[in-house]
Image: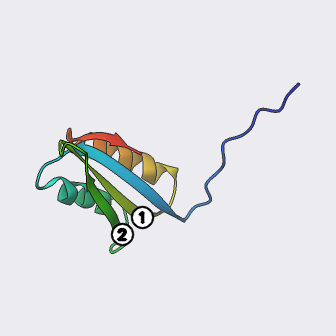
Amino acid sequence: MADTPQAPTIEFPCRYPIKVIGTATDDFTDLVVTVVEQHTSAGDVELVDVRDSKNGRFVSVRIRITATGEEQLQALHLALKSTGRVHMVL
């Protein structure tokens, strides 16, 4: 019987990258940073990169945080999606 590979486990706390994709608007980056800051410690959000899509319709915002646990990451994902402006969180 073959062993099933296990998903790698994350040891918390750790630096954790998040990529958020949404429709390009003037305030999308500010929205993402505000939501992320609500789920992290003060001064813990590092805005890494903001990129527009080829046609300028979408924007991706890459952020790095210090993740404290799975509950935090799940709550953050839910909060970002509940804005109604986020298409994908990676």
| Picture coordinates of residue 88, whole percent (x, y) | 33, 40
Between discs 2 and 1, the one toward the N terminus: 2
- Name the residue at 37% across, 51% down: 19
Q: CA distance from mark 2 to mark 1?
A: 6 Å
Q: Is residue 76 above or below residue 82?
A: below
- Name the residue at 35% across, 57% down: 62
The amino acid on which the numbered mark 1 sits, given as a three-letter code, is: Ile
Label 2 crowd (10 A; few <14 / some 14-19 / many >=20):
few
| Picture coordinates of residue 49, whole percent (x, y) | 32, 62
The foreground one among 9 and 63 is: 63
Label 2: state its secondary structure: strand
Q: Quadrant of the C terminus?
A: top left
Discs 2, 1 touching: Cβ within 8 Å: yes
Q: Where does label 2 land, which residue?
A: 46
Q: Is residue 8 above or below residue 3?
A: below
Label 1: state its secondary structure: strand
Total labels: the figure holds 2
| Picture coordinates of residue 44, whole percent (x, y) | 38, 71
Q: Quadrant of the N terminus?
A: top right
Specify the farthest residue to the right: 1
Q: Where does label 1 land, which residue?
A: 65
Q: For residue 23, which numbered disc appears in the image?
A: none
- Name the residue at 55% across, 65% down: 13
Say whether residue 58 is left or right of residue 49. Answer: left
- Name the residue at 41% across, 54% down: 18
The amino acid on which the numbered mark 2 sits, given as a three-letter code, is: Glu
Specify the farthest residue to the front: 54
